[in-house]
């Protein structure tokens, strides 16, 4: 039987991966379920229990970063250097690196990226044995977080032509309403992001933007899995647009 922690199965090669949802956790109230974020006002012990459950499911300690809507990428130190910075084994508080993507060729840790409407992007080059996770919101996507992540993967031997990608549950182009000016600014960088809500107002389609960025960088179209639910419409996932006080779910991936 599939674990309730696995809300969605990414289609990706060379890695074990999952997208969590709200099911399977111990948080209550506005964070009810499997909230994985420490910074959102949830009970700390509940968050650690939730993180431990996900670590057990993926079979390795989770590494998180402090996400700040940047294009900064954290490349994990080599395996013999120990867990290094970043959050160590699940439940173990530690200094956390500020970044919005994590890259590694290690097999002994799982990378985790937290979201609630933004795009959780998982990347894996099964040939080179290099994996990454990225948090791509509007700012990070436009500032080049995905290009920066692919660049750090390449430094470890990955090639875009071999990369497989999964863009997980996130707010869709028919729901992500933004001011007209914001749509224009985004479209000036990434034309495919220009969208319209189902109620007729200006919107952004960040998922289409991410697909476009990955393809422009050389990732084959057929290697990109973007068929996942909209977080605003699907209550199995946390959505910041639905409720400003809410939890975070995660894209989690481990090389192998
Ligand atoms: Zn939607």
Image (cartoon, rainbow, N blue to C red):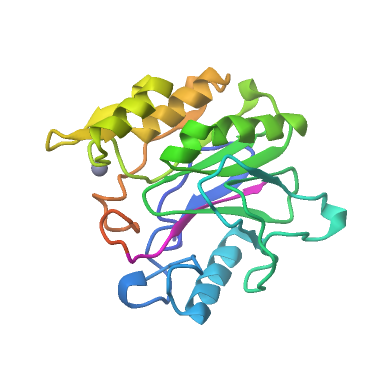
Extreme-right residue of the structure: 80
- In the figure, 154 relative to 113: above or below? above
Closest to the observer, 97 or 27: 97
Q: In this view, does 153 lie to the left or right of 234?
A: right
- In the figure, 243 relative to 194: above or below? below
Quadrant assignment for the N terminus: bottom left
Residue 162 in the image, given as x and y percentages of width and height: 64, 25
Q: Ligand 1: which quarter?
A: top left
Magenta span has 249?
A: yes
Where is residue 89, by image quadrant?
A: bottom right
Extreme-left residue of the structure: 199
Residue range highlighted in magenta:
245-256
- In the figure, 226 relative to 216: above or below? below
Seen at 51% across and 78% down, the residue is: 44
- In the figure, 255 relative to 95: above or below? above
Closest to the observer, 15 or 66: 66
Residue 10 in the image, given as x and y percentages of width and height: 48, 43
Where is residue 189, by image quadrant?
A: top left
Quadrant assignment for the C terminus: top right
Q: Is residue 43 visible?
A: yes
Q: Is residue 127 visible?
A: no
Closest to the observer, 177 or 175: 177
């Amino acid at each position: 039987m599939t674990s309730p922690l696995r809300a969605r199965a990414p289609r990706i090669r060379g890695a074990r991966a999952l997208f969590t949802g709200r099911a399977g956790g111990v948080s209550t109230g506005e964070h009810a379920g499997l909230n994985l974020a420490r910074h959102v006002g949830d009970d700390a012990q509940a968050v650690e229990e939730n993180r431990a459950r996900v670590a057990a499911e993926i079979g390795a300690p989770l590494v998180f970063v402090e996400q700040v809507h940047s294009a900064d990428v954290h490349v994990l130190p080599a395996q013999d250097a120990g867990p290094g910075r970043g959050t160590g084994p699940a439940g173990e508080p530690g200094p956390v690196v500020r970044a919005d993507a994590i890259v590694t060729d290690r097999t002994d840790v799982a990378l985790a990226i937290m979201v609630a409407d933004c795009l959780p992007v998982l990347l894996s080059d099964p040939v080179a044995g290099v994996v990454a996770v990225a948090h791509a919101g509007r700012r990070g996507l436009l500032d080049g977080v995905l290009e920066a992540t692919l660049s750090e993967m390449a430094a470890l031997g990955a090639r875009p032509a071999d990369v497989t990608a999964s863009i997980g549950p996130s707010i869709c182009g028919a729901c992500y309403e933004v001011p007209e000016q914001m749509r224009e600014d985004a479209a000036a960088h990434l034309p495919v992001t220009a969208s319209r809500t189902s109620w007729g107002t200006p919107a952004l389609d960040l998922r289409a933007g991410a697909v476009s960025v990955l393809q422009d960088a050389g990732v084959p179209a057929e290697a990109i899995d973007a068929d996942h639910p909209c977080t605003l419409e699907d209550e199995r996932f946390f959505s910041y647009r639905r409720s400003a006080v809410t939890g975070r779910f995660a894209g989690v991936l481990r090389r192998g």
